[in-house]
Image: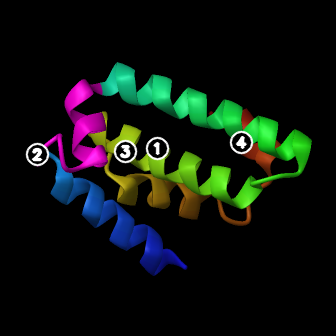
Amino acid sequence: MSETIEKLIKTIKSKKGSDVKSSYTSFLLSKGNDHCLNKLKEEIAELEEAIKNKKNITHETADVIYHLLVTLESAGVNFDDVITVLKKREDTSGFEEKRNR
């Protein structure tokens, strides 16, 4: 499973600076962080609707993951850093983790 995410992250990185007419990822990245954030919000709203209607949930979830990764790339966030934080949280209660922030 993580191979798919890793491959997607590499593909997103490789599209930075590519032709915006032939790459949707490049187009999104060229529009900047605010645009990527707005697109992510739109996709989250679509996921919310899909869950409520019990239709297209996996498709909309995939869209959210893709747009989250594009937004992180746009913001200059290294996904490995996100994984590091998640690993640190392993075996920790969510309540405890929130108290420790």
Q: Are marks 2 and 1 in contact (CB under 8 Å)?
A: no
Residue 23: x and y in percent read: 23, 49
Is 68 positioned to the left or the right of 61 in the image? left
Q: Earlier in the sequence, mark 2 or mark 4?
A: 2
Q: Which residue is mark 3?
A: 70
User: Cα distance, mark 3 to mark 1?
Assistant: 5 Å
- Amino acid marked by disc 2: Asp
Residue 20 in the magenta stretch? The answer is yes
Query: 10 Å neighbourhood of mark 2: few (<14), some, or many (≥20)?
Result: few
Q: Which residue is mark 2?
A: 19
Query: 10 Å neighbourhood of mark 3: few (<14), some, or many (≥20)?
Result: many
The residue range painted magenta reads: 18-32
Residue 15: x and y in percent read: 19, 53
Is 51 positioned to the left or the right of 21 in the image? right
Which of label 3 and label 4 is nearer to you?
4
Q: Are marks 3 and 1 in contact (CB under 8 Å)?
A: yes
Q: Which residue is mark 4?
A: 47
Which of label 2 and label 3 is nearer to you?
2
Against 72, residue 42 (above or below) is above
Location of residue 73 (image quadrant): top left
